Each structure stands twice: as structure tokens, then as C-alpha cells.
Amino acid sequence: MIAIKNQYFIFLSLFIGLFLSGCTDKWEDHNKIQDSILAENLLAQIKTNPDLSKFADYLNKTGYDKVVASSKTFTIWAPTNLALQNLDPAIVNDTAKLKPFVANHISNQSYLTSMPNPLLTIRTLNGKNILFTKTKFEEANIVTANRYVGNGVLHTIDLGILPKLNAWEYLNNTATSLQKTFLLSQSYIFRDSTRAVVIGIDPKTGIPILKEGTGYFPKNYFLQRVADVSNEDAKYIYVILTDAAFTAEKAKLSKYFTVNDPIKTPARNTFISDSITNWNIVKDLAFKGDYTLATLPDTLTSNDSIRIHLDKTAIVQSIKVSNGVVFIMNRIDYKMSRKIKPVIIEGEYYVSNYGNNGTRTTITRRNPNTNVDFREIYYYNTGVSSYWIKYQPTVYTASYKVYWVAVRDFNTTAVAPAVPVMFSQRLAFGTTALLPAFPYKQVDILNYNEVYLGDYTVTSYGKMDTFLVGAANTTNGQNSLVLDYIKMVPVIN
């Protein structure tokens, strides 16, 4: 019996030993395979796949073979040979065009298909953003996924993805048009001394001496002041008007931006008027937001707070760009009263005054009718006849209805002969002494409403000297000035 037990234990030990030995061999084989893959870089892995031979060739042509063979970490979405068979020969045979195409399929860092939830926006090596989901890379389907190698991850896809132009690049690549011509005229070259090459220091001034030809960069006033539709990390709807639509807009707006400067030639005035009109068209054609034609709302608000109606029936073409969508349109719609807005002149924001006479204070009050706070300027005890404060609003070429709000809520206590001392003031345009000017108007006590002053016609677009003028006497208390704001409402026709 003991002998049988001993034989059983010997047999069991041998069986377990053989089993463990077999498992160990298989695990070691598995580790050898994994170690072999992880020892490879992305370039080596691509080269071992015959279905990626075209992409491997493009990597070599563009120099990206050295990049993806480096120790940095990358993700590559490699198009198969079938996916690349119809790639435009003009791209394949031109390294300058092929390079951004190849770079459009490579990003820094590792991205697995398990990461998007539901999608990721990823910056590729050419500076463009692409959309990555669990199954797609932009419009391409992911054929094989998550192939780990030593310096990143390899996916294969069934379509080569051309880099999309951003809205600004698209405009620059369109045929010549009125809108494009004007926008390109707003470009200039700027020198950034912090990015120029320093070749020495001036011993007299201590100012760095910059290498000639360095530090110069293109800029554009539209991109700086309205909307940077070249920004890859933003989303825009950008409208490009057909020439017919652009001309129609000029016909509507030009009369409000007519410059009649007597010291300039008629030709120069015409040129300036035309430029200002063009600017006031293009400044309201870019809108922030991530929309498609299907999700386009009825009305969008421009950077200048103008509500623009984009009628879908007026869209000639819709182009998906890397930072949004471009609509080519034959018409836009808006209320002219929102485009040609009332001119508001705040009392405290004057540019100059008669002199340092008297006392100036800025009063903060609450309108009891609206419970809204307001600020107004108050000048008193100047001892000067017709003391004035000067403003310089930018005005349209138009006729205006002119109002002011001037609240007298101080010195309201009655004095002999039982009434407070009252004062009057007036508005004058262009000059303090001569017409055109509105007549003096008494500032009533505790009047928080807009007071109609009269009509005035502006004959030249631009800054207009506007004066708030005190009473024509030197008696303190009777020649004070007070102003919340002036409103000039253009008459639209």
C-alpha cells in the first residue's frame, strides 16, 4: 500500500513538473513576441507590413521616416496601399505638397481607440486638428487598431486624409474677388524684435542690434481686430460674398460712410470712403461657433454685436474647413438700424475742456424710475462765460435725432425768491462759438428722461468735434454743466 502511494506521488510530481514546464515555455514564447514588437519603432513596423509599402515610401520621401524612427512617442494612422491608389499624382510627385499630407496622419503621443468618448480632437504634425473616434479617423475607417510598438501606436485606415484648409487659407486660395482683394489689402509686415536674431549690442544705446531680414512676420488687420479665422483651435462660420452680393452691400452702406474732408482731394476722399465701406461689410462676416449647414441657426451675432440673418437659400456653396465652415453666399440680411447704430457720447469721457477753471466731479447716481445706476459729469464754479467740454464721437454721414440725459439732482433747495438757481447749457458741433448749434436748454430738476434737442445732419463720416457749452455768463451756479450722455439716433432711409 505504501509503495502504491509513493508511486502515485512520484507520478503526480512528474505530471505537474511537465505541465509547468510547458506553461513556462509558452509564456516565454509570448514574452519573446511582445519584446520583439516593443523593440521595434513605428518605421520598422510599417516597413514589415507589405500593405503599407506606399505610405512607407512617402515617409522616406518627406523625411518623416527619421522622425517616426526616433525615441519620441507618436501615433500614426497609416493609409493602406488601396487607400492611396487614387492619391493625386500632383501631391505624390511634389515633396512640398506630400509633406503636409503625410504629417496629417501623424501626431505626438499615443492614442488608442479606447480613448475617444465619443471623440478626440488631435493636433497632427502639420498643425491641423483631426477628429478621432473609436472607429474613424476623420472620414476614414480604422481597419486595424492599437498596434503597440516601442515608440507609439500604429493604426491602419482605408482612406488617405488630405489636410483641410482653414477659413483664411481657403479665402487665399479662391479666385480673385472683391472681398478677397480688400482683405488682402489689410495685410502688412510686422517686425517682432523679440523673435529677431540679435547680432550685437549698440555700445552707445545698449539696444540690441538685429540681423537684417529676421523677425519679420505677416499680419492682417482683419485677423487682429475682427476674428482670427486662421486659428486652427477655434471654430468659425465664415461668409464669403459673391461679387454681386458684395456690390449690393456697398450700395446699401456707402452713403453712411462718405468722407468729405476739405483738406483732401476728391480722389482721396473717394478712396477713404470706399475703404471704410468695405471694412464695415467684412467686419460682420465671421461668427464664432461650431455649426454645419444642418445645424445653422436662423441668426448669428458678429464680433461687432450685429445680428446677421443667413438664409440657407442664399448659400451658393458650403465648404468644410479645418476650423469650421465657409459659406459662399449671394445675400445676407440684417436690420439697418443695427448696422448703423445710435452714437452714444458718455458725459465723463471727454477729450478736452476750456481750462482748469472751477471744479469737476463724476457723480454716480441711481435712476429711481429704472433702479439702474448711471454716471454723469458735473462742472461748477468755473467763473467763465460759455465754458465748454469737448467730445469727439465717430459719426456716420446721416441725419440725426439728438437727445441728452442731464440730471439735475443737486442744489435743489429753494433760495430767495423761493426757487433754486437754475442753469442752461447747449450742444454745438464743429465749433463752440458759431452755428450749427442747438439753442440753450434749461436743465430741469430731477428729470431722468432723454430730452430731445433737435435734428442735425452730418455731411462727412469720421470724428466730429462736439461741445457741451455752458451759459454765456460768469455767475457761478448759473453756468454749471452736467451730462449723463448724448444720444444721436441716425435716420435710416
Image (cartoon, rainbow, N blue to C red):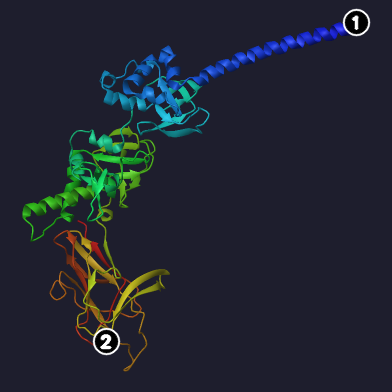
Choose the circle earlier in sequence order: 1 or 2.
1
Image quadrant containing the C terminus: bottom left
Q: Mark 2 falls on what kind of element?
A: loop
Residue 406 locus on image (x, y percent): 30, 74
Q: Reply above or below: 425 against 319.
A: below
Name which quarter of the figure residue 387 lies in: bottom left
Frontmost residue, 321 versus 75: 75
- Circles 1 and 2: CB atoms closer than 8 Å: no
User: Foreground: 263 or 433?
Assistant: 263
Mark 1 burial class by Cα count in 10 Å: few <14, some 14-19, many 20+: few
Q: Callout 2 environment at 10 Å: few (<14), some (14 to 19), or many (20+)?
A: some
**Which residue is at a point 36% across and 27% down the rendered structure image?**
103
Q: In the rendered image, which residue does mark 2 sit on?
A: 476
Quarter of the rendering occupied by the N terminus: top right
Can residue 463 be seen by looking at this rendering?
yes
- Name the residue beneath numbered marker 1: 3
